[in-house]
Amino acid sequence: MRGAFGKFVLCAVLLTVLLGVTGCWNRRELNTLAIAVGMGIDKRGSEYDVSIQVVNPQVMDKKSGTNRSETIQFREHKATIFEALRKMTTVSPRKIYLSHLRILVLSEQVAREGINEVIDFISRDHEARTDFYIMVARGSSASEVLNVHTQLDNIPSIKVFDMLEGSEKAWAPTSTVRLDELIDALENDSGQSGVLSGVAVAGNKKKAMTQENIERIRLPGVLKYSGLAVFKQGKAVGWLNEEQSAAFKFIMGKVKNTVSDVPCPAGGKLVLEIFDTTSAMIPKARGGELSIALKQKLFANIGEVSCGIDLLNESAIEEIEKRMEEKHKRQLEETIAFVQRKYGADIFGFGQSIHRSYPREWKKVKANWSEAFRELPVTVSAQVTIRRTGTINNAAIPSS
Amino acid sequence: MWVGIAVAALVAAAAVIEAPSLFRESAKTEGILYLALAAAGSFTLIGYTGKFYSFVFLRWVDIAFLPIGNWVAHLFGTGGAS
Amino acid sequence: MREEAISARQFTALALFVTIGDSLVILPGTMVSLAKQDAWLSMLVGLAAGLPVILLFLAVHARGAAASPVVKLKRICGPWFGGLFILPYIAFSLFLSAGSMRILGDFMITQIMPETPGTAVVALLLIVAAAAIRGGVEAFARAGEVLLLCFLFVFFFFILTLVPQVDFHRLLPVCENGPGPVAHGGLLSLAFCFIEIMPLMMLMPHVKANSRKEMRRALLIGAIAGACALLIVTLLCITVLGPGHAERHMYPTYTLAKKISVGSFLERVEAMIAFMWIISTFMKLGVNLFAVHLGLAQWIGSRSYRTLSVPVAAVTLALAANFTDNMAYFNHIVTLAWPIYDLTMLFVPLFLLGLLLVRKAGKRG
């Protein structure tokens, strides 16, 4: 390619190409997107009723003091979730963008009828990530959960997300479940068993849905975490209460920090702040008999004392440790027995741990694991170590 | 489709500039090869002879090697459809 | 024209990129789908089986005068009979170029830009590749050296940010389904990582190595480092995602990148990770295209290998565009037929080595 003409033509062609390739083919400008932060899925007859909460960018700009809502909810129903979402373009001026989804709320009905379709759509979609929390609306519809007006954080979805995230770190009963964790739990040799956190509208439900809700100091209605929904075969079969939810999280070794009360020897109560836990799940196969041994280690500080006890006395500390161990052991054993008896759903991943350590024995019980799980002997041992007593030693004002 | 046409146009433009000089420099084999390849590529890009290409590229690999591949999968116990 | 030269270090970088190449996109997923949690063992099996293959390439290079395999074949067998081996070799390199382009195009469409025609993505990369051919071997190798730095930076970032999520229990139970699936996975890694280094042989005569030992060291270090990188990525796929999750995802390494989350502010960096693949796939594409150009030029005896850059790029694009329309069929081919094709292509270096040995023996006798 010699000659000025050749070079000229080449330059011209390249420049022309440049015009066409400067941008992204799939570009979507920020002002053409409706950024979804929350998604609620209800059932209407046999159809999915999908609610999407998108942020309202005009109101997020704090300077323009409007009284418009910070979020907008779109709602459509159709036989499948994907269709419902696409049909939403008939009501939404902008295309729904799912990458920033914070929470996915399923109504209890959806959960009970099976969540596999929901999981498939949401993990197949290329925009959705896996870092949002999935939960089941307890006692109200998913759409209502997204509709509650919230204070501190004006966007309900983000409020719920932050609440769960904060509570998960400081309160044992609260467990958060992300998409990948859910899939992991459902598919891991457990007969599609797992848990999802429950969320409920507490207080005055009607007022909670209105602007009035955030005009008071004491909110008439709030979104509240409430227990764990137990899944079996991909369907919700029931709930765990607060104590059982805490036990579940201890067994999974996910407790980062929580508090627990212990009865004092001389009556009254003492509160321990548990700041570190380790949990070991040890499967055993002795003579063809499968069993699980749970070994828990708890490290705690004394957080509140409302009884007469001499904390400077070493044997008193040991006594507290022993009482806490007993309480913890009982709590875990009762929860496991409850789940085995009532639901027969291996939410703890016992099956998986047997599979990993004893693949040959696992092959024998795999087919009817949910029956074998009901009969599985589980032994719990707990060891509590109290490290510190807080900034004071004995009770500030000794109770008589 | 439009992308194909645009690329084909680019290829054609390059051929107009480059191929004559090859013949001028009496590099005949290259010239012919140049034109043949450019034509083959462009025709496919504007939407013809795609079937032929997928045969040249992949179908024959499929036809020739899939039976062996299946046999290997069978040997290793990893399944494999017939 | 001055002889174009590559330094041993640049050659190491090229070897590393060719080993990793598009395997980084597809290999972990396909291996996990075969061998489940033992996929990392497959990678080790592949490495063990791949070392002799690399030694074979080196042996072919070391025998006879310093020239590319195409030149050697032509010199010994003549252009027509030699063509029986040269043509499949060139076609193999061309198919590898088109295949890696298609894999990258499919990935971009599936995960990042679903409404963009794949051809457009591929075309842009091929335009750059054609420019690389015009720039010549030397410039390309230098680019490889520079890109290696970027690649390693992103790679180590990728690993370090995922380490906190590693759970080694996911590797259990080891060898649950016996050695068969591990061996099949090993066959895949052998084919995709090591046999596909073959086009790199065309660049070997350009390497300015002081001794055969240095040459061998450069290639072995590059290939082994590449294999280790893939081993680490496979391990991460299993220990972070779990075998079930990794198997179901089309591109588990990308899903892995989506999981990066450091203190909830260092997130959503997956596009940066995709950059890593674009580099490695592009470098592999470049090496394959160089093999095509050098091979064609040496075969027909033309003075410059650069003249054909545009039409070859057009044909590569056409091949990539008509690869297959169906991802299921594609996966089927990739796991079952393609590795066998790779394996059978070993007949070219084996035949050439046989020829060279016989000729040497003849000369001595």
Image (cartoon, rainbow, N blue to C red):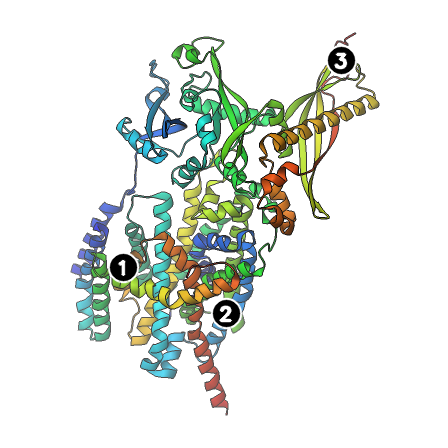
Q: Label 2 vs label 3: CA separation?
A: 76 Å
Residue A335 location, quadrant:
top right
Horizontally, residue C277 falls left or right of residue C170, namely left
Q: Amino acid at mark 3?
A: Cys
Q: Amino acid at mark 2?
A: Val
Q: Nearer the viewer, residue A185 or C80?
A: A185
Q: Label 1: few (<14), some or many (≥20) within 10 Å?
A: many
Horizontally, residue A210 falls left or right of residue B4, namely right
* Residue under the image location 38 percent in, 49 percent down: C107
Q: Which mark is residue A307?
A: 3
Quadrant of the snapshot with the C terminus of chain A: top right
Quadrant of the snapshot with the N terminus of chain A: bottom left
Q: Chain of mark 3?
A: A
Q: Which mark is residue C53?
A: 2
Horizontally, residue C117 falls left or right of residue A304, namely left
Q: Nearer the viewer, residue A279 or C109?
A: A279
**Secondary element type, mark 1:** helix
Q: Position of residue C278 (x, y in %)?
A: 39, 51
Q: Position of residue C84 (x, y in %)?
A: 34, 77
Task: Residue under label 1, please give it.
Answer: C318
